[in-house]
């Protein structure tokens, strides 16, 4: 046990009590013992590189290049996505892909290149493979986006004395070998992604681990890894934007170093990425184009984001520690009496009977369905937490059913693995088994019967409390992995994803007329198919506030558009100013909810004084006014993969200054939000993209690109609207109207509106609008020429000119 383990043990005892702390010590020793006896020792290994290219065979979409000690399959799909698989690795099976592998581009051709290499030529991308196995992905014009150096494997020797030699050196080795691949990108490139990273959204130089991890307490910008990691990088450079996804769920480490330009000397230092994986296949996808095109391609590959119901785009209140039904009623009444919009209340683990999943504490919630119906009549839904751990207790209905269904993870000896969670000694369903997913998904009938309208998955990295070492299942624990079989080293990172699939599919079957509402603390590439995520236990403090924005931006660039933080932070009691600034940020994020730990105080806006209450009410009303815009952004995310919350460089990736902006964001195409992330700030600098931008509070106009100073009083955060934009908002009568911001002189604008189609599966029509000056007035009309069905309000006509921005 090291110093970090000791600190975690103290935190754990505080959170779970002495008895659970003792169980966590025993669980940690069990895990260590199981892994020591069941995992293969590293032992003798042999290093291997591809060697020299010998020949190649053409296949649809590309071909296979044979090297002396390996082979490389290059495959270009329709749309330009490039797949590369070494050592016979194919695109499937994959937890990330949505359905079947995309069709190949019939026009992509494999042909010889210079100096003994090969290349695959297609309309949207050029792939060049050197004779020693370096792979370059270039634009059709030849500009290099990414250069993968020849990989290196360390294969375990399968039999003593099976040394092998020369070209046959790989013949007597185990399949699962660890490997490393180094890559180069342009000197000006910036890295984003890798899932939920508190220190982003731009990824700094250093090591980033790929292992979903409960940090064991509240986290801040310096903590890594966190709950939801993905081997997905988005790289932005002058030459172009590309996304690379290494389809491998094993534990790994990504080491990044940004490049440097030679200041006119011509000796640029490229940016570098080194990926080390403990096992599994070496296979990856590369998608290139504009940021919008890249995310569209990523969505086509891994699935369209689930569309949250309309109410889930409103404000939601969560708390660990509701005293019971009467306190829930008092809190909801408090919002209603103060005219504060509220969409949902979330019940944490304390609403369970002894923390047992799919149960209810009947003393505190004697009639939960009645409470849910009562709240729904007031426009407020109930959302339930669901953890994967099942208390290992005969007589517990879920445990007994799981035992009968042989649903729980077993160890290498065939015994059911036991860990420790909130309910005590627990067992864990194997969600990598389709049969178990179906069993688990049917259990959500109990949640629906209790009146819950949505679910919130927690502790699904998965977590087993441990006083030292990793707080998860033994790495040697066995999993079905869709019939292939394997252990927790491969299954760990996809455990939360597979649990989300089980819930989503189950809810669709149980209530097919409604879209499920689900968000999950852990997951992997493709999580968006089933729902969203949230920050987890972000630390209360100004660094935690900044980390909240980083997480949402980074996850959106990995294809998960619906996320948000615990407003106010999870761990402590925020000052009134910090709470308000966090609340104001949350009002412009997809998932807008407050939440806190049992010991961290309350999060109702009125608990922080009259001034905070007044300004929080304004933020809530603005969120309600923008709800039709959030509905549209959700529909567009489903159709295109574009996140609600976008980095400032989204539409101008070649603007280097915008690439480094981390304290502001775009909400869709129309709005720029500049939250206040520092104590005492009532004015802040904002770097603008090109064009005219209006301060939505004052109407003042600013010209970008460049930096401007804007007022940020405690009553609001700066929000600027793009000139010419048209966006849907809620009118005074409750209907939807269009808010149009005057285009700059001689320019045009426009926007999209997707009307609310209800909480079912309807596919509403996308309406496109244009704005222009005509005869001294701004004209807004439908692009298809159909009659205007919305009232239009034009803003920015009398705005004070703010002048040009600073450089």
Image: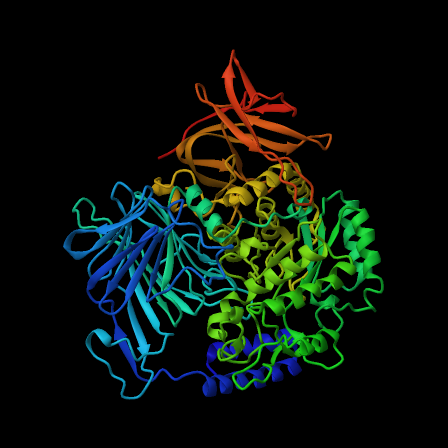
Q: 402 or 544, which lies in front?
A: 402
Vertical relation: 381 (above or below) 216: above
Q: Where does the image place residue 439, in percent across and percent down from the top left?
A: 67, 68
Nearer to the camera, 786 or 748: 786
Indicate left or right for 154 with 21 as reference. Answer: left
Residue 14 in the image: state x and y as whole percent.
62, 75
> Which percent across, then down, holds residue 143?
26, 44
Q: Which of 45 and 35 lies nearest the eye of the viewer? A: 45
Give the residue drawn at x 26%, y 40%.
Answer: 141
Q: What colour-coding does the image apply? A: rainbow
Q: Is residue 243 above or below residue 471?
A: above
Q: Is residue 696 visible?
A: no
Q: Residue at x 61, y 47 (%)?
A: 307
Image height check: is 758 above or below 47? above
Q: Left or right: where does residue 555 sit relative to residue 179?
A: right
Closer to the camera, 104 or 511?
A: 104
Q: Residue at x 69, y 78 (%)?
A: 404
Quarter of the image where the C terminus is located? top left
* Residue 86 figure quarter: bottom left
């Amino acid at each position: 046990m090291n110093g970090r383990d000791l600190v975690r043990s103290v935190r754990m005892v505080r959170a779970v009590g002495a008895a659970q702390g003792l169980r966590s010590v025993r669980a940690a020793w069990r895990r260590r013992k199981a892994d020591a006896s069941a995992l293969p020792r590293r032992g003798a290994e042999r290093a291997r590189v591809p060697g020299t290219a010998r020949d190649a065979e053409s296949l649809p979409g590309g071909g296979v290049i044979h090297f002396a000690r390996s082979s490389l399959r290059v495959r270009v799909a329709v749309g330009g996505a490039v797949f590369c698989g070494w050592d016979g690795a194919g695109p499937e099976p994959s937890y990330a892909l949505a359905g079947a592998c995309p069709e190949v581009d019939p026009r992509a051709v494999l042909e010889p290149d210079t100096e003994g290499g090969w290349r695959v030529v297609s309309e949207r991308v050029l792939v060049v493979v050197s004779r020693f196995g370096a792979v370059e992905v270039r634009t059709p014009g030849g500009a290099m986006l990414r250069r993968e150096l020849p990989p290196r494997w360390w294969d375990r020797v399968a039999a003593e004395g099976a040394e092998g030699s020369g070209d046959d050196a790989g013949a007597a080795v185990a399949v699962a070998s660890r490997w490393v691949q180094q890559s180069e990108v342009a000197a000006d490139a910036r890295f984003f992604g890798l899932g939920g990273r508190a220190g982003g959204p731009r990824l700094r130089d250093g090591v980033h681990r790929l292992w979903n991890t409960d940090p064991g307490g509240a986290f801040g910008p310096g903590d890594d890894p966190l709950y939801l990691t993905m081997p997905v990088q988005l790289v932005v450079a002058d030459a172009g934007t590309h996304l690379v996804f290494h389809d491998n769920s094993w534990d790994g480490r990504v080491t990044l170093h940004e490049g440097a330009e030679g200041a006119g000397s011509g000796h640029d230092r490229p940016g570098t990425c080194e990926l080390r994986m403990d096992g599994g296949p070496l296979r990856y996808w590369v998608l290139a184009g504009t940021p919008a095109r890249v995310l569209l391609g990523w969505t086509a590959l891994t699935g369209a984001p689930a569309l949250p119901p309309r109410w889930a785009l409103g404000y939601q209140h969560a708390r660990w520690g509701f005293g019971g039904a009467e306190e829930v009623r008092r809190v909801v009444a408090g919002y209603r009496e103060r005219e504060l919009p509220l969409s949902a209340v979330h019940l944490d683990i304390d609403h369970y009977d002894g923390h047992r999943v799919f149960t209810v504490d009947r003393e505190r919630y004697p009639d939960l369905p009645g409470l849910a119906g009562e709240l729904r009549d007031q426009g407020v839904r109930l959302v339930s937490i669901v953890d994967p751990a099942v208390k290992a207790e005969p007589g517990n209905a879920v445990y007994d059913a799981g035992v009968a269904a042989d649903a729980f993870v077993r160890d290498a000896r065939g015994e059911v693995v036991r860990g420790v969670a909130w309910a005590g000694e627990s067992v864990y369903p194997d969600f990598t088994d389709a049969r178990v997913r179906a069993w688990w998904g049917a259990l959500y009938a109990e949640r629906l019967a209790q009146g819950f309208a949505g679910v919130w998955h927690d502790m699904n990295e998965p977590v087993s409390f441990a006083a030292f070492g990793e707080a998860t299942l033994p790495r040697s624990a066995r999993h079905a992995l869709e019939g292939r079989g394997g252990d927790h080293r491969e299954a760990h990172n996809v455990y939360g994803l597979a649990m989300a699939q089980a819930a989503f599919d189950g809810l669709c079957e149980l209530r097919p007329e409604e879209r499920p509402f689900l968000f999950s603390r852990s997951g992997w590439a493709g999580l968006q198919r089933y729902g969203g995520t949230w920050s987890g236990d972000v630390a209360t403090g100004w660094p935690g506030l900044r980390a909240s924005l980083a997480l949402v931006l980074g996850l959106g660039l990995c294809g998960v558009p619906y996320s948000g933080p615990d407003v106010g932070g999870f761990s402590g009691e925020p000052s009134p100013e910090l709470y308000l600034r966090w609340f104001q940020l949350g009002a412009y994020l997809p998932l807008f909810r407050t939440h806190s730990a049992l010991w961290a105080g309350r999060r109702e806006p009125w608990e922080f004084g009259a001034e905070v209450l007044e300004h929080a009410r304004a933020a809530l009303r603005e969120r309600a006014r923008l709800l039709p815009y959030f509905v549209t952004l959700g529909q567009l995310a489903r159709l295109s993969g574009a996140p609600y919350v976008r980095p400032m460089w989204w539409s101008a990736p070649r603007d280097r200054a915008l690439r480094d902006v981390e304290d502001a964001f775009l909400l869709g195409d129309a709005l720029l939000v500049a939250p206040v992330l520092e104590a005492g700030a009532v004015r802040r600098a904002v770097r603008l993209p090109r064009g005219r931008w209006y301060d939505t509070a004052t109407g003042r106009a600013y010209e970008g690109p460049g930096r401007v100073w804007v007022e940020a009083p405690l009553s609001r955060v700066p929000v600027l609207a793009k000139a010419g934009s048209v966006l849907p908002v809620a009118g005074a009568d409750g209907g939807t109207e269009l808010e149009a911001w005057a285009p700059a002189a001689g320019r045009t604008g426009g926007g999209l509106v997707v009307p609310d189609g209800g909480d079912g599966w309807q596919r509403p029509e996308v309406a496109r609008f244009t704005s222009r000056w005509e005869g001294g007035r701004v004209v807004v009309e439908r692009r298809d020429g159909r009659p205007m069905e919305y009232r239009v309000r034009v803003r920015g006509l009398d705005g004070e000119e703010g002048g040009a921005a600073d450089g």
